[in-house]
Image (cartoon, rainbow, N blue to C red):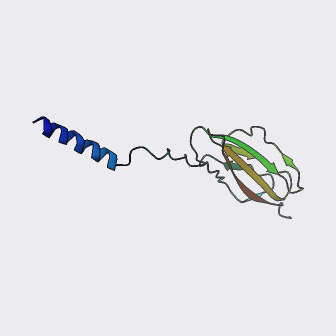
């Protein structure tokens, strides 16, 4: 009877050993992905609304927005750390919004969207 118990124990140990154990390191979490959603064309004076809420990543994400004007200068929005960005363009041309997201592990990703702002129609 004792021999049968030892065989059962030995069999169980062999099964666990065949599983490979826990030799592999835990998988690294997926890096963050930045995504901007919003209109790519607007009229001068329109309120531009861009949304970064579909950005993904492990842990809490932080957001940082910047905007480049058609003249090549840039400005920091009033609330650059929000998931969304709103602004009113004061000149026609291409406005480029950039979103940088950072995850809880310090990794970051960015996305950019150009919004073509049309001049007002002539009367």
Task: Describe residue 47's horizontal placement relative to residue 26 as left or right.
Answer: right
Q: Residue at x 57, y 39 (%)?
A: 59
Q: Residue furthest front?
A: 3
Q: Residue at x 72, y 57 (%)?
A: 113
- The answer, for residue 92, to whether it is visible in the render is yes
- Residue 57, percent across and down? 58, 45
Which corner quadrant holds the C terminus?
bottom right
Q: Residue at x 51, y 47 (%)?
A: 27
- Residue 40, percent across and down? 71, 60
Q: Residue furthest left?
A: 1
How many callouts does the rendering have? 0
Q: Is residue 94 above or below residue 56?
A: below
- The answer, for residue 88, to whether it is visible in the render is no
Task: Describe residue 121's horizontal placement relative to residue 6 as left or right.
Answer: right
Residue closest to the eye, 44 or 112: 112
Residue closest to the eye, 7 or 76: 7
Residue closest to the eye, 101 or 86: 101
Which corner quadrant holds the N terminus?
top left
Task: Describe residue 82's horizontal placement relative to residue 43 as left or right.
Answer: left
Residue closest to the eye, 107 or 16: 16
Task: Describe residue 9's horizontal placement relative to residue 109 as left or right.
Answer: left
- Residue 86, percent across and down? 73, 45
- Residue 114, percent across and down? 75, 58
Q: Residue at x 76, y 52 (%)?
A: 97
Q: Residue furthest top?
A: 2
């Amino acid at each position: 009877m004792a021999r049968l118990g030892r065989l059962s124990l030995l069999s169980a140990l062999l099964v666990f050993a065949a599983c490979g154990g826990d030799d592999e390191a835990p998988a690294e979490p997926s890096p963050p992905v930045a995504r901007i959603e919003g209109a790519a064309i607007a009229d001068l004076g329109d309120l531009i609304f861009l949304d970064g809420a579909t950005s993904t990543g492990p842990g809490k994400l932080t957001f940082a927005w910047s905007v480049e004007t058609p003249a090549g200068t840039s400005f920091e929005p009033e609330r650059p750390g929000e998931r969304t960005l709103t602004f009113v363009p004061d000149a026609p041309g291409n406005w480029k919004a950039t979103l940088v997201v950072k995850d809880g592990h310090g990794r970051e990703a960015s996305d950019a969207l150009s919004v073509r702002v049309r001049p007002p129609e002539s009367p």
